[in-house]
Each structure stands twice: as C-alpha cells, then as structure tokens.
Image (cartoon, grey):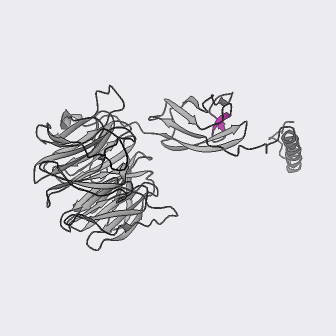
Amino acid sequence: MQINLSIKNKSWQRLGLGLSALALSAAAWANPIFDQPDPNFTGTLGVSGVVYPGQQAEVWGRGFTPGQEVQLIRSGNVLSGTKPLVADDKGEIRTQLTIPADAAIGLHPIVAQVAKPSAATVFDLKVSPVVPAKGTELYVLDQAPVTNGLYQVAYSAKNNALYVTSSVGRPPVKQSQLSQLDPTTLKTLNAVTPTADPEREGQVMAVYGVAVDDEANTVWVTNTRADTVSVYDQKDLKLVKQFPHGSAVHARDVVVDGTHQRAFASSPTSNQLYVFDTKTLKALEPITLNSKTRQDFSSMSLSLDPKNHKLYTVSLRTNELAVIDTKALRVEQVIALPGIKGAAGVSVAADKNRVFVTGQGSDSVGIVDVNKGELIHVVQVGAGSLNVLWDDATQAAYVANRGSDTLSVLDSDGNLIANLEVGSFPNHIATDHNGHVFFVNKARGQNDDSADFITRLQLK
C-alpha cells in the first residue's frame, strides 16, 4: 500500500499511517526483525590507508562467522551495493567504497548491519583534507639513510650530536638500534644494539622514545615492549642503567628536566606519568593523570618548558591537555580539546604562551592559550597529524603528517607557511635551536626508497 504524502487532510494522513504500520507489522511477522542474534559476535571493520574526497576507500573486516552477510550503511543509505557482502571461509570481508567528491572532511560513522546470524557494529571512516604542496622553495632539505624502523630523534647541544632510535616489527623484536649521528653530515658516528630481554627469549630491549640529559651526559630511551626505560652514555652509547620490566607501563615518550634532575615517561595504556631521578637513577612515585571525562587519561607525547617549570602531555583516549608542575610534581590543570580527535603530539611555545597539539583522528592541529587554559584555534593539516614541534629559532611549528607523507609548517597563529612532501610516514621531529629542524620517517614496507631517513631542514 502506498501513502500519498500530498493529502492534506490530517484524518486521511492518520488513516494512511495506520494502514502502513499494519502492513509493516505483517511484514515483520513474516520476516521476524528479532531473529536469533549472534551470541559470540567478534566482527570488526576498518579502512586501509588515507581516504580523500572523490576517491576509493578500501574497507576490510575480520572476525565474522564464515557466510555472515554484511551491509554497510551511512545515514540510512546502503553503501555496499544491492547485494550484501559475504564473509569468506576465514571470516573476512573486503570491499571498495566510492567517496563522493563533495564528502565532508572528518570522521563518518558507518553502521555494519550483519545477518545470518544477526549483529551490528559501527566503525569510523575518516575522510581527510587534500592539502596541496606549498612553500617548497623556502627550504633546503638534506637526507641520509640511517637504519630500518626509525622512531624518534633527539639533539644534544653538549655533544652536538643526534640520537636516533629504531625498532623493526612486532614482538619478538630482534632488530633495534640506538644511533649517534653527526648533525652536519648526517653520518652515523656510533650505534649499539640493546641488550637481550631477560624475560623474553630471542628478543632485545627494543628502543622507541628518546631524550637527552646534557647535565648528566646521558641518553634516556623507552623500552615500550618491556614496559620500562633505560639510560645510555652519550659519548660511547654504553648502557648505564636498565630499569626492570614494569617500571613504566608501555612507556612511549620520555623527556628530561635537567634542572630538577627528573625524567618523565608517558604511558598511553595507563593514567600514570612515570617519574625517575636522573642523578640516582631510581624510580620515583608516578603522577596520576585524572581525566575530566569518564575515561582514563592516556598520555602520548611530552613537551617541557624548563624556564617556567611546566610539562605538557596530551591524552589519546580523552583528547585533553594536562599541565604538570615539574617542581611540585603535580597536575596543575587538565584542558579539554574540542575538535581534536586522537590527540597525539604536543609542543609548547613558551614565549607565545601557547601549546600546539595534534589530532591524528581529526587531521588537525589545535592551539591552546595556556594563560586562558583553553583551545583557541584548530587548523586542518595533512592526514594523520602525529607529532608537532615548536622551534623558537624559526618561530614556526612543524607538524609530521604520517598519513599524507607531509611536513606542515605553521606560524604561531596557525597560518600555513608550507606543506612539504617528505617521504613515507614522517614520525618524529627535533631541533638544534639554531635554525635546523631534524625529522625521521619510517618505511611503508619493504623496498620503500623514500623512508628510514634522517632529514635536516633549514630556511634558504
């Protein structure tokens, strides 16, 4: 039965709607809506790579029961075609979706409606902004290969040296290295392989995050897979101290406050900020980071303002910025970051009273006024904005966009100065505070000639 929506008489409208409801009820009894659900549903879906307006999105799914049927729905529209997708004998599905050229930038929730047996789940399809190359004529870039699996880089003014961490693959990690580089030639001066993991046979104490302590002439690194940190001598890269397993749960980043002889390690999987005495090399009481939301704070990058005794970190899970007093070792405030999704990078511009934060999920950089304690501006940059560095010497913020293989350069107000194509997966950035910015990028896979480089960038 069809309802003529042009009928203006309300009684006829009510009659039509009533008959329609009866028809729907009859159809429901013929084909029950509340059929047997899947009691052990484990299906998950996601999108491979970066998705831009007007392009194809590669959608994958796994954990389904073989033969289960899946329809992908957005705003009531079926995206996956006239026939449902069917899970193969491995419980996997794969399809391509055409994204309209006028698709809005952002995270789009996609409903996966599942049948035989029935279930449902939701996943995000992120449409990223296209940011054209800009300002390439402003900079000189010099590159040099280092080793496979580069993660982070730190600069020592005391020894005029770069320290780079690298680790390859998932556990058991057998290939990892701490390298010392000449910042002028970018040549490797020294390199060491971490010691064997005492609790995991065939695995080394792989290194990820890195920071220098020029007061003690040491290098601090995070052993993320082993939930701890370790300390090396800057000169010869000899191991000074290996903290035991569990000293810092899933330690990610590390920074050193030489003035107060403290090292801080972030933890994305807990709400703890781990603290160490850089003189005695002993673990101190961790700082608990409490979120203003109902979820746990999960700290990512760290940025130190030694002059004002402040440490900044962002929460991946709750999208907040925490401000820590490094003298009192307590949290001063937690600031919400509306519009930022997947907060990851942070860098303080102390002379501007501003903090830059990145949102991997929102492809954006947020600017926080630390005096007001609030987010004042959000700017779209490249896809997968992972890390950011404010450089006082050049008065600019450098943003590593891991998804779009670009490095964005912003002024203190968030205006785009440059957007540079820099090779696969730019990962981490450092400065010598003298006009040179260094960053490392990771390979997208084997035979990737545009990655595992250290790059030095400077204005012409």
Residue 220: within the magenta? Answer: no
Span of residues in magenta: 65-83
Q: Is residue 92 left or right of residue 142?
A: right
Residue at point 51%, 31% (across, down)? 58
Residue 100 visible, this orientation: no
Residue 425, quarter of the rendered image: top left
Q: Residue furthest top?
A: 447
Q: Nearer the viewer, residue 36 or 193?
A: 193
- Asked if residue 126 lies left or right of residue 133, the reply is right
Q: Residue at x 12, y 53 (%)?
A: 157
Q: Please say whether residue 16 is visible from this viewpoint.
A: yes
Exactly how many numbered labels are in the figure?
A: 0
* Quadrant of the rendering where the C terminus is positioned: top left
Q: Position of residue 402 (x, y in %)?
A: 36, 40
Does 352 sit above or below residue 126? Answer: below
- 405 or 194, which lies in front? 194
Q: Is residue 63 left or right of residue 18?
A: left
Q: Which x, y percent locates residue 148?
A: 28, 35
Quarter assignment of residue 94? top right
Indicate the quadrant containing the N terminus: top left, top right, bottom left or bottom right.
Answer: top right
Question: Is residue 347 depicted above or below 144 in this figure?
Answer: below
Residue 43 x %, y % = 61, 40
Q: Position of residue 258 (x, y in %)?
A: 18, 63
Q: Nearer the viewer, residue 340 or 226?
A: 226
Instruction: From the viewer's perspective, tell me whether residue 110 is left or right of residue 104.
Output: right
